[in-house]
Image (cartoon, rainbow, N blue to C red):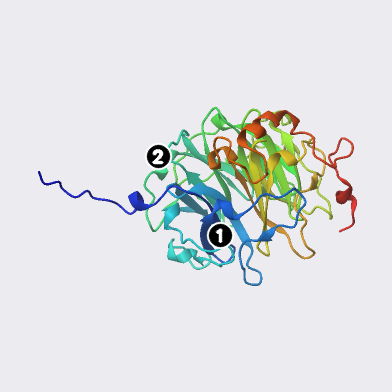
Amino acid sequence: MDQQPEDFSEEDLVAHQEVVVTLSSRGYIKRLPLSTYRAQRRGGVGIIGMKTRENDAVRHLLVADTHDKLVFFTDRGRCFQVKTYEITDESRQARGESIHQLLTLDQKERVTAVVRMPPELERDYMLMATKLGEVKKTPLKSFANVRRDGLNAMDLEAADELVSAKLAADEDDAIIVTARGQSLKFRVGTLRSASRLSGGVRGIRLASGDRVVGMDIAQEGLALLVVSEFGFGKRTPVSDYPLQGRGGQGVITFKTNPKTGELIAARMVHAEHELMLIAEDGIVMRTPVAHISLQGRSTQGVTLMDVRRGDRVAAVAEIDMRREFSGVDELPTGATVEDGARKKGRARKVPGEQGGNGASPDDKKPR
């Protein structure tokens, strides 16, 4: 009996693989295997991750499966969608391809947020935040079929920009963080659901000169990680943040000063995950989250990355080691998945720490 040949799509021929996707400020994008980056202790210098032209810093970095959908949001409130495998696979030092070869962006339009949408999606809304402190939630079904030439995701004021987008549900709590170290946690369900074409409402009241740098979904048992432009950072338990009504000034989450610089990133992290930091000059460092000390809200943190003079941290990504490794396979940290679970209770202690603020002797050296 003759058998009919099966039809295969391009996606059927692509193997599942965890990859790192990077996008530079000049719009060069690439993907490469996550295993390219070995793990290091916090405070290290890192390795070269991407050759960049002068003033072309890496701005976005995320870890995804090759079959995941990636939704790109721009400063103008538009969104685009591609499959991860459609992004060119490059070497660690390569610059990558122009984002304009994937997305139909306008001349001066910039990508400001990227959301990974795995197949097993369990969220109801896309929650968005702007530089001037506005927030909005839109039903996720509105982003089910994003055209190649993009869709409008949010109506913005002339001086405002979309800076963050997250998957959320009504029962979730969201935390907004500003460059000068303020934060506000509010219930997503208090926001009315709005269409893609509408604008937002006030999420946090900003002090003069301040701006929103990040927003994430608070999850019980996790910690909020904040990272400053000069490589300082810390974890703070999410329980330390009071639930407030949106529109207020919030509470302090990080003491910024000339040594630390302003905050550039904020995200929820798990003690068993890893953190990847990338500097403007393309240097990448990967370190276990458990090596970053837990501290109170009103502290300045410890050195996470030894940033060279004149350089800055440009992007931060969290890696779930339990997705990347299974069984008793060796981790980049030299431990195993089973060992990591047994050592979970000792996550608060970091070698070399002194006192209650988590500072190490290296942190006291002048910059």
Which residue is more in the foreground, 319 or 269? Answer: 319
Mark 1 surroundings: few (<14), some (14-19) or many (≥20) residues within 10 A: many
Secondary structure state at the residue bearing disc 2: helix
Residue furthest to the left: 1
Which badge, 1 or 2, is on the more N-terminal residue?
A: 1
Mark 2 surroundings: few (<14), some (14-19) or many (≥20) residues within 10 A: few
Q: Quadrant of residue 334?
A: top right
Secondary structure state at the residue bearing disc 1: strand
**Which quadrant does the C terminus fall into?**
bottom right
Amino acid on which disc 2 is placed: Lys
> Which of the two marks, 1 or 2, is nearer to us in this view?
1
Residue at left offset 81%, top offset 38%:
298
Image coordinates for residue 245, horizontal then vertical, percent = 65, 31
| Residue 9 seen from this side | yes
Residue at left offset 78%, top offset 36%:
297
Image coordinates for residue 314, horizontal then vertical, percent = 67, 57
- On the picture, is 259 further left or further right than 243? right
Image coordinates for residue 15, horizontal then vertical, percent = 41, 50
Amino acid on which disc 1 is placed: Leu
Q: Which residue is mark 1?
A: 23
How many marks are shown on the rendered structure? 2
Which residue is more in the foreground, 8 or 255? Answer: 8
Q: Quadrant of residue 220?
A: top right
**Height in image: 48 above or below 261?**
below
| Residue 109 seen from this side | no
As measured in the structure, the alpha-carbon distance from the residue carrying label 1 to the one carrying label 2 is: 26 Å
Which residue is more in the foreground, 58 or 202? Answer: 58
Residue at left offset 43%, top offset 36%:
120
Q: Which mark identifies residue 141?
A: 2
**Which quadrant does the N terminus fall into?**
top left
